Amino acid sequence: MTFSTDHILQGMRDSSIRNQNNLEMGKGKESNILIPTTKGMQLEKVKNILCVCAEGSYSELILASGTKHIISKNLANLTSLLPDQIFFRVHSSVIINISHIAEIIGNEVVMTNDIHFPIAQRRKKGFLELLKRNSLSL
């Protein structure tokens, strides 16, 4: 029995398209994320993610409830997965959900759980532009 390379390549293309579609479907504000836990998987709304902090080649995902999860993806991987309408990488080691910002003091952002993160100087302009696009100004 022989397989044509066209058939194999078509299967690879179809799989790639399905994976891309699944990623895009999961990038909305109301989408869910599956978080691996020691007991299995936890389904959580993306909007409930407060922030993600770098922990070497792992990341610590902190939920608005205060629950913390260590996951085996680095920030670069997560940046491409999380919706960029509400998530922003304010520093090389932190991605925040702008829906959970309490205030901005100088070059620091304070989250609703009172965690403070520095805003990198080179990222501040893009960060402020995102906030302006997603907020009402008085």
Image (cartoon, helix red, strand yellow):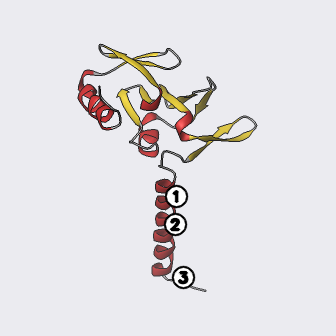
The residue to which callout 3 is attached is: 3
Q: CA distance from mark 1 to mark 2?
A: 11 Å
Q: Nearer the viewer, mark 1 or mark 3?
A: 1
In the image, farthest residue toward the bottom: 1
User: Residue 55 placed where, x, y %?
Assistant: 50, 25
Q: Amino acid at mark 3?
A: Phe
Q: Is residue 110 left or right of residue 61?
A: left
**Horizontal relation, residue 92 to residue 40: left or right:** left
Q: Residue at x 59, y 41 (%)?
A: 45
Of mark 3 and mark 2, the one earlier in the sequence is: 3
Residue that appears at 65% across and 39% down: 36
**Disc 2 secondary structure class:** helix
Give the crowd class for mark 3: few <14, some 14-19, many >=20 residues within 10 Å: few
Residue sitting at x 33%, y 32%: 136
Find out whether the residues at labels 1 and 2 contact each other: C-beta distance under 8 Å: no
Among numbered discs 1 and 2, the one appearing first in the sequence: 2
Alpha-carbon span between mark 1 and mark 3: 28 Å
User: Does residue 117 lie above or below 97 as drawn?
Assistant: above
Q: Is residue 74 left or right of residue 130?
A: right
Query: Looking at the rendered structure, which numbered label has been put on residue 22?
Result: 1
In the picture of the structure, the residue carrying the numbered disc 2 is 15
Question: Can residue 79 be seen from the camera position used here?
Answer: yes
Residue 48 tag number: none
Quadrant of the image for the C terminus?
top left
Q: Earlier in the sequence, mark 1 or mark 3?
A: 3
Amino acid at dot 1: Asn
Instruction: Indicate the quadrant where residue 37 lies.
Output: top right
User: Tag 1: Cα neighbours inside 10 Å, few (<14), some, or many (≥20)?
Assistant: few
Q: Are marks 1 and 3 in contact (CB under 8 Å)?
A: no
- Label 1's element? helix
Marks 3 and 2 close (CB-CB < 8 Å): no
Residue at the (38%, 33%) spot, across then down: 88
